[in-house]
Image: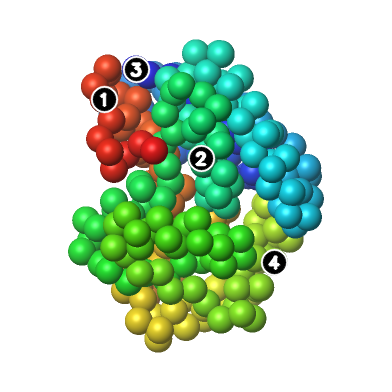
């Protein structure tokens, strides 16, 4: 089994979810007492959150690049960036190391394509919803159109992520408002919903939505196990960036 290199801490709540999902999936596939071979480099989310909102993406790129390098030195065979938003910096992470990066957009888009859907609604941080690193990759490489919520709804989704979910706070009122936003996206023509922030899966699941859900964290974690168990075979172009 290949060693999975995880860049975590954005937030630790979502990193814990990644760790659990990866090991549960490994045990499901291999049975017995098996778990995944992995390393995790954890950054301080207080620093990350501050730099995100200050717009200092260059410093954040350096931080993630150093984390990826530490994983490579430790023996990781590929990198899993345990966050959607920070895939804005996927390129500098990839250039910092010789091992590949398992890109969350590619994994999520693969699941959408299997469902034969062409128009999806996106729930994520404002960075992910409003900047083009996520939506353009979905559209440009996979032909998937991304619908985002209204300005007011985007702010609410963003605030719940940073003020509640990153602290492990789960509120029913927030879930209900997210459900309203999902209906808003359905009204705009979305065929399914992408949970494009790793923490959102702590709040929203299939039972909370009238539309099918693509849970990016779960998809990413399972894809990591899939690649780790392939032995020495080269990854397909749709799997790794």
Q: CA distance from mark 3 to mark 2?
A: 26 Å
Q: Nearer the viewer, residue 133 or 154?
A: 133
Work out whether residue 214 can be spotted. Answer: no
CA gap between label 2 and label 1 equals 20 Å
For label 3, the residue is 1
> Around disc 4, counting alpha carbons within 10 Å, would you say few (fewer than 14), some (14 to 19), or many (20 or more)?
some
Kindly report the distance in space between the C-alpha atoms of the residues bearing marks 2 and 4: 27 Å
* Residue 159 tag number: 4
Q: Position of residue 151 (x, y in %)?
A: 61, 80
**Residue at horizontal 68%, vertical 34%?**
63
Which residue is labeled 1 in the image?
234
Helix or strand or loop: what does disc 1 sit on?
loop
Query: Which is more toward the observer, 75 or 213?
Result: 75
Q: How many numbered marks appear?
A: 4
Q: Which badge, 2 or 4, is on the more N-terminal residue?
A: 2
Using the numbered discs, state the Cα–Cα distance from disc 3 to disc 4 in whole angstroms: 39 Å
Tag 3 or tag 1, which sits nearer the N-term?
Answer: 3
Label 1 to label 3, Cα distance in Å?
Answer: 14 Å
CB atoms of marks 3 and 2 within 8 Å: no
Tell me: 99 left or right of 167.
Answer: left
Q: Nearer the viewer, mark 2 or mark 1?
A: 2
Residue at x 35%, y 62% (from the top left corner): 139
User: What residue would you read off at disc 2?
Assistant: 91
Q: Secondary structure at mark 2?
A: helix
Question: On residue 62, which mark appears?
Answer: none
Q: Nearer the viewer, mark 3 or mark 2?
A: 2
Determine the image quadrant of residue 197: bottom right
Q: Earlier in the sequence, mark 2 or mark 1?
A: 2
Let me know if residue 53 appears in the view. yes
């Amino acid at each position: 089994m290949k060693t999975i290199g995880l860049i975590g801490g954005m937030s630790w709540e979502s990193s814990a979810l990644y760790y659990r999902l990866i090991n549960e999936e490994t045990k499901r596939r291999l049975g017995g007492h098996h778990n995944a071979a992995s390393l995790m480099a954890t950054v301080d989310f207080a620093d990350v959150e501050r730099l995100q909102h200050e717009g200092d993406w260059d410093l954040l790129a350096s931080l993630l690049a150093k984390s990826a390098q530490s994983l490579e030195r430790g023996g990781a065979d590929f990198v899993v960036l345990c966050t959607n938003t920070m895939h804005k910096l996927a390129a500098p992470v990839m250039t910092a190391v010789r091992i590949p990066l398992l890109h969350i957009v590619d994994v999520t888009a693969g699941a959408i394509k299997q469902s034969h859907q062409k128009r999806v609604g996106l729930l994520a941080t404002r960075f992910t919803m409003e900047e083009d690193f996520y939506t353009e990759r979905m559209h440009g490489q996979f032909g998937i159109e991304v619908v985002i919520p209204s300005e007011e709804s985007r702010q609410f989704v963003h605030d719940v992520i940073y003020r509640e979910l990153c602290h492990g706070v789960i509120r029913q009122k927030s879930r209900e408002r997210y459900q309203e936003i999902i209906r808003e996206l359905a009204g705009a023509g979305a065929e399914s919903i992408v949970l494009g922030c790793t923490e959102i899966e702590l709040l929203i699941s299939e039972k909370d939505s009238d539309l099918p859900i693509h849970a990016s964290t779960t998809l990413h974690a399972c894809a990591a196990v899939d690649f780790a168990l392939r032995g020495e075979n080269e990854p397909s172009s749709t799997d790794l960036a």
